[in-house]
Image (spheres, rainbow, N blue to C red):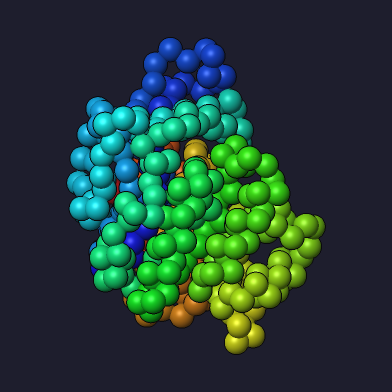
Amino acid sequence: MDVVTIGETMALFTPNEEGMLRHAHSFSMKFGGAESNVAIGLSRLGHRSRWISRLGEDEFGDAMLSFIRSEGVDVSYVTRDQNAPTGVFFKEFRRMNDTRVYYYRKDSAASRMNADWLLDESILDAEYLHLTGITPGLSPSCREMLEKAIRVAKGNGTKIVFDPNLRLKIWRDGTEARQFLKKYASESDIVLPGISEAEFLFGALSPEEYVENFHELGIETVIMKLGKEGSLISSSSGLVKKIPGFMVERVIDPVGAGDAFAAGVLSGLLDGKTLEEAALQGNAMGAMVTMVNGDAEGLPTRSDLVSFMNGNLEDVTR
């Protein structure tokens, strides 16, 4: 298995028109979750990915499992809970560049994941273990589960990739969030923070100072997302380089761009690309998904990604 990832995915309801959610009368149902987005992104690029989670024994869970399985992702370690629901969330497109997200995930099936539930064998065949800062915020039992996952990965020589993916709404307070995000980052080989997440963790500094702070936590490789400016890569060997981003004429939906970035970077590393090449591919993936409504819908195939990076996408293909 190339990449194993663990986390919650929810049913996503998006209004069929822009404006405040209170005025919406019809919705489209999709699915969204950082970890499954990464798994789907990797699968579409031809890699073997596994998503581990827990779903409610309900219609949302049935539909989600069918969708993610159909994308070629291994879901053999996803379990169902008869006593807790699959989580739900809503997107609100208020106006251009103003997207808001509302979660209804308290006491969801995924929040009940725990260390006893996680099987060692689900991780042992992985080259990379991808984790985010969302899962430990769901519950204390989820934190215990991630700690077990990290122990298993380290004992097996599996590299750990951590995306802080800050979601303050799921933490008790900022102090708790900061404590645990730093903890999981320090136990990882590669960290993929956004610039705002770095500021949350370390205060107002320059991007170069942020990556130095991450290295001081013991992290070997830092790839920091800089939005439309691209990304900044830094390794313990002393390499620090800014990687340019890709121009997008209109952002339709920015949610999921960071997950696409992670999939692009991991795909590059799996393909034996240099850190610079992997980050450039991540930048391209992040740009591409912002042009499509939905968390996973804009994740490209390998041929689409190559065309985009080469500037060959046309308005009409005949």
* Picture coordinates of residue 238, whole percent (x, y): 64, 85
**In which quarter of the view is residue 59 placed?**
top left
Q: Nearer the viewer, residue 167 or 291?
A: 167
Vertical position of residue 294 compared to residue 271: above or below = above
* Residue at (41, 30) in percent of width and height: 88
Q: Is residue 43 left or right of residue 232?
A: left
**In which quarter of the view is residue 311 placed?**
bottom left
Quadrant holding the N terminus:
bottom left
Q: Nearer the viewer, residue 225 or 221?
A: 221
**In which quarter of the view is residue 205 placed?**
bottom right
Vertical position of residue 318 compared to residue 184: above or below = above
Q: Is residue 118 visible?
A: yes
* Picture coordinates of residue 307, whole percent (x, y): 36, 61
Q: Residue furthest front?
A: 116
Q: Is residue 160 left or right of residue 81?
A: right
* Residue at (39, 16) in percent of width and height: 26
* Picture coordinates of residue 204, whole percent (x, y): 79, 57
Vertical position of residue 72 compared to residue 160: above or below = above
* Residue at (40, 63) in percent of width and height: 149
Q: Is residue 192 left or right of residue 88?
A: right
Vertical position of residue 304 compared to residue 317: above or below = below
Q: Residue furthest right?
A: 204
Q: Is residue 241 visible?
A: no
Count of picture labels: 0
* Residue at (64, 78) in percent of width and height: 240
* Picture coordinates of residue 104, whole percent (x, y): 47, 28
